[in-house]
Image: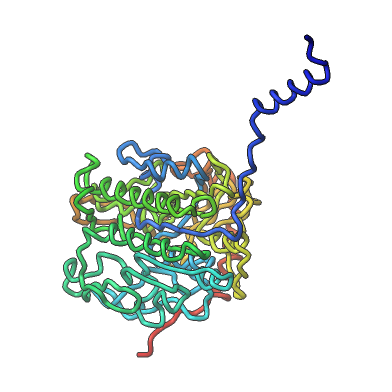
Amino acid sequence: MHVPKILASLLLASLLSCSTPPPPAEAETPVGPPNIIIVFADDQGYGDVGVYGSTRIRTPHLDRMAAEGLKLTNFYAFPSCSPSRAALLTGAYPPRVGIPDVIGPEGPNWTANKQYGINATETTLPEMLKQAGYATGMVGKWHLGHFPETMPLRHGFDEFFGLPYSNDMHPGNDPLWPDLPLLDGDEVVALNPDQRELTSRYTQRAIQFLEEHQDTSFFLYLAHSMPHVPLFTSDGFRDRSGFGTYADVIEEIDASVGELLATLDRLELDENTIIIYTSDNGPWLTYGNHAGSAGPFREGKGTTYEGGMRVPFLARWPTGIPAGSVNHAPASLTDVLPTLAALTGAPLPERAIDGRDLSLLLRENQAPAVTPFYYYRSGNLDAVRLGRWKLHLPHNFRYVDRVANDGNRGSYAYRDSELELYDLYGDPGERYNVAEEFPQKVAELEALAEAFHARMLREKREPFRPAR
């Protein structure tokens, strides 16, 4: 007996429908603005990360950030601690906001003119994000003034755990320094804390912040005290790298990043969290084996040559940044605030800033328009870059005269630079001055520098200074 054709057709269709898998469900897009984490290293050089060329330091978690996100190769901080922190948190060149140089407590050779801090009239990154509903927390090194009026809780952070300034400013390093306080909010919880546990304590406090604020938009600023000297690691990382204390310290910081990434995954926050990793300046080269590497660049911390200011920058955001992105466009710490304003809908500060919105660079790997970048050091404009060209104006700079090792500091010598023009595409090490070959380019950049610096001097704002 034959099955009627129509019944056979129905049976065949039924069988096919059972054997064909249903179409995949569309992935859910996270709702709401992204969470933000900024991890800020201290004195970590350009060449101290695997994806930036290190062959002696293992950084699997930072390398993962590059593979799953964005790596910038021309990213700039400023030559020293406080100015870079001011640029990151205000979006402005350091002299504009009255923080041209390193500040700190009264100490050895530390005169009263360095006793100041960030002014309450400045709108900081956490203050901006709070207007968009973010919870804000800071863990680590502040270094924008140690007076009550200049501390993190007065400048937009809901929580703070860390040090008010650098980890070498303590009486064990020089008896003229005051005791170094470890703070929880405004409360001193330890004096001259055991620095072997600092990175670990910072990491655990950062994780606690993520856990407590997982149900709201948050901004976490984790500013490690290391690898600024003196160097310390917890027991689990001591001698682990096989390449000395400095490598041990970077590997512990890398592991800290790994713990943050694991926490985001555990809390199901990974997809819609931007995590940025960068450094405040180049390596402190006179410390020898306790200093990092500037990679292919000239000089280090405290200078406006590339080794002093060009630093790693990695950003990871699974729903917003294409994996494996690399971009060679110049960018700087001043660009972070306006970029995050664009990505979160937070209002920009009312007062003038210098940074640019680079949200298209993050989202689409689209290079921004070529604009000048100005290399400020201690309030002086030392150099200007436009595209491939960098012009050094005549200035006095330091270079390593003697290296010391194992935590001992060497010494610098000083000399004056000439009017020097470098092609950073062909000569990133700034070794071949081509000013005589390109006089028109020298004149163009010199005019840009003079005009901008004159405007900066007119527009610069005052920091907070305590009554005397």
Q: Nearer the viewer, residue 418 or 46?
A: 46
Q: What residue lies at 37% left-to-right and 48% top-to-bottom?
A: 258
Q: Is residue 126 above or below residue 257?
A: below
* 369 is higher (above) or lower (below) than 106: above
In this view, the residue in front, 113 or 328, is 328
Residue 386, image x and y in percent?
59, 51
Residue placed at 47% from the left, 60% from the top? 382
Q: In which quarter of the image is residue 453?
A: bottom right
Residue 373 placement: quadrant: bottom right
As drawn, the residue found furthest toward the front would be: 1
**Colour scheme used in the picture?**
rainbow
**Quadrant placement of the C terminus:** bottom left
Give the residue at the far bottom of this rendering: 468
Residue at figure coordinates x 46%, y 41% from the top left: 432
Give the mark count: 0
Q: In which quarter of the image is the N terminus?
A: top right
Q: Residue furthest top?
A: 1
Q: Give x and y (percent) for residue 450.
A: 58, 64
The residue lying at 22 percent from left, 39 percent from top is 242
The spot of residue 94 in percent (x, y) is: 48, 68
Instruction: Pick the residue in front: 444 or 198.
Output: 198
Residue 45's place in the image compared with 344, above or below, is: above
Whether residue 137 is visible here, answered yes or no, is yes
Does 85 sit above or below residue 400? Answer: below
Q: Is residue 455 visible?
A: no
Find residue 365 and report its horizontal and vertical position in percent: 61, 45
